[in-house]
Amino acid sequence: MTIGDDGPVTATRPGEVSEREAEVLAALGARLSNAQIANSLHISIRTVESHVSSLLRKYGVTDRRALAAIAARPAPARPAPGRHRRPASSPAWSAGGRGPVRRC
């Protein structure tokens, strides 16, 4: 995160937030307490507090209500890792990328 002329630049790329932080963020969006989040994710309350603190810093906000509002925003669409969409006009490809599928 950097500070720009308009204030903090927030974490907007999914790679900037770990998978576990994303789970905590979603739980904050569901208005769960730290204890409830810890119980549902099978981690300690202190670990939840650490993730919340990290999310506050990464998103440049000061309280968990702001994080809950961020969690309520729709996530940008992105392809699954390791998968590439093929153009509609290209031949069908087999699983594993071993070439075109022969149709008999």
Image (cartoon, grey):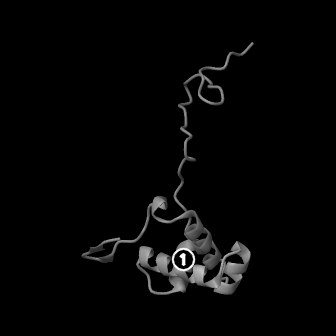
Q: Residue 36: percent from the left, percent from the top?
A: 71, 83
Examine the rendered structure and indicate whether residue 79 appears above or below residue 22: above
What residue appears at the point 68 percent right and 79 percent down from the top-left corner? 38
Q: Quadrant of the C terminus?
A: top right
**Is residue 25 in view?**
yes
User: Against 7, is 80 above or below?
Assistant: above
- From the image, which quarter does the N terminus lie in? bottom left
In the image, 78: left or right of 100?
left
Q: Residue at the spot x=24%, y=76% of the render?
A: 5
- Dot 1: within a 10 Å radius of its alpha carbon, few (fewer than 14), some, or many (20 or more) residues? many
Q: Nearer the viewer, residue 12 or 88?
A: 12
Q: Nearer the viewer, residue 97 or 66?
A: 97
| Residue 33 visible within the image | no
Residue 44: x %, y % from top left: 65, 81
**Which residue is tagged 1?**
51
The extreme right residue here reads: 104
Identify the residue at the far left of this view: 5
Q: Position of residue 34 (x, y in %)?
A: 64, 85
Q: Quadrant of residue 27?
A: bottom right
**Left or right of 50: which side holds 60?**
left
Q: Residue type at mark 1: give it.
A: His
Report x, y in % for residue 75: 55, 62
Residue shown at 69% from the left, 73% from the top? 41
Q: Nearer the viewer, residue 78 or 27?
A: 27
